[in-house]
Amino acid sequence: MADIRWQRRIRKELEDPVLLLAFQGWSDAAESASMALDYLRKKLGARLIATISADEFFDFTVVRPQVTMDSKGARRLVWPDVRLYVAETPPGQCDFILLKGFEPQLKWRRFANTVLEASHELGATRVVSMGALLSDVAHSRPIRVIGSSSDPQITIKTGLTPSRYQGPTGIVGVLQAMSQQQGMVSTSLWANIPHYVAQTPSPKGALAIVKKLQLLLDLDLDLSDLESATRDYQIQIDKVIASDEDAQAYVAELESRVEDDEEPEIMRIASAEEIATEA
């Protein structure tokens, strides 16, 4: 696998590892999915084990390298990349492989195969992809997490509601479809984010995804810090809406749609099943 650079090798075989993945960019409304994955990375004490080469998969006019400066004034060039982490848990629990980075612009099939080959090498048989999409929902309501799974029992356990969206998808959808084609148990989780607050990073969206993951994977994590950040986020958004009469009226309309039990309009998502059928 020339496209992947191993930083370290795992000394022991991972226990029933699950691949968790999220990407910054098109499928990450309000940074909810990448925030959820980063939160899990820190909570689980995950260690960096590999990076995927940026040169083959990124258009640097779209995702540009960054120039940083240290305390001594020395400049450093930081290239965008995709990073692979491993979190080892106590015996009897599944371990985790976490994939995080910017969504690539080029050679998606090759990129997806690189990711899946690395996952197979580490022993993963399950994959959970995380995303966030824009939707006509009110910020005052609980974040709804929809998705699908190739295992019907997971759908029942988590109460996932499949989306009926048809249209363009991102690398998350491609990876879900290809992993399913290769025999992995594939599950997707998508948080519905109010479109009118999409520019503000949403700990509320991240919390909804993490809670669904806890249910899916039988995790027991202390989420008090993320819950506190969610309360602060809610207060800030409420203040902004309260200062604008038009915004208040619009939110009230969205709230009434939920009360009328209407399904919110989803602006973008494609299921793995649809992609797999057409591939």
Image: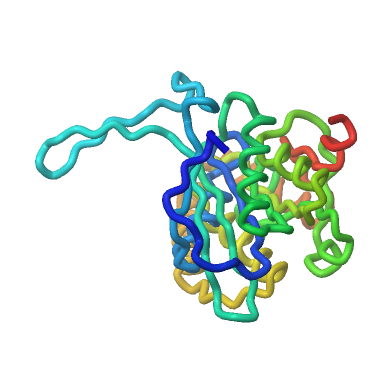
Lateral position of residue 32 relative to residue 149, left or right = left
Lateral position of residue 59 relative to residue 94, left or right = left
Q: Residue at x 60, y 34 (%)?
A: 26
Rendered position, 41 above or below 75: below
> In the picture, which quadrant includes the N terminus?
top right
Residue 38, horizontal then vertical, whole percent: 48, 55
Camera-nearest residue between 10 and 142: 10
Q: Residue furthest left?
A: 72
Rendered position, 118 above or below 174: below
Q: Residue at x 50, y 61 (%)?
A: 10
Residue 133, horizontal then vertical, whole percent: 66, 42
> In the picture, which quadrant includes the C terminus?
top right
Residue 77 visible to an observer of this rendering: yes
Give the total number of marks visible in the rendering.
0
Q: Residue at x 52, y 72 (%)?
A: 223
Rendered position, 141 above or below 104: below
Residue 14, horizontal then vertical, whole percent: 60, 66
Rendered position, 106 above or below 34: above
Lateral position of residue 7 relative to residue 272, left or right = left
Camera-nearest residue between 252 and 74: 74
Q: Residue furthest bottom?
A: 91
Quadrant housing residue 109: top right
Residue 244, horizontal then vertical, whole percent: 51, 42
Question: Colour mode?
Answer: rainbow
Quadrant housing residue 28: top right
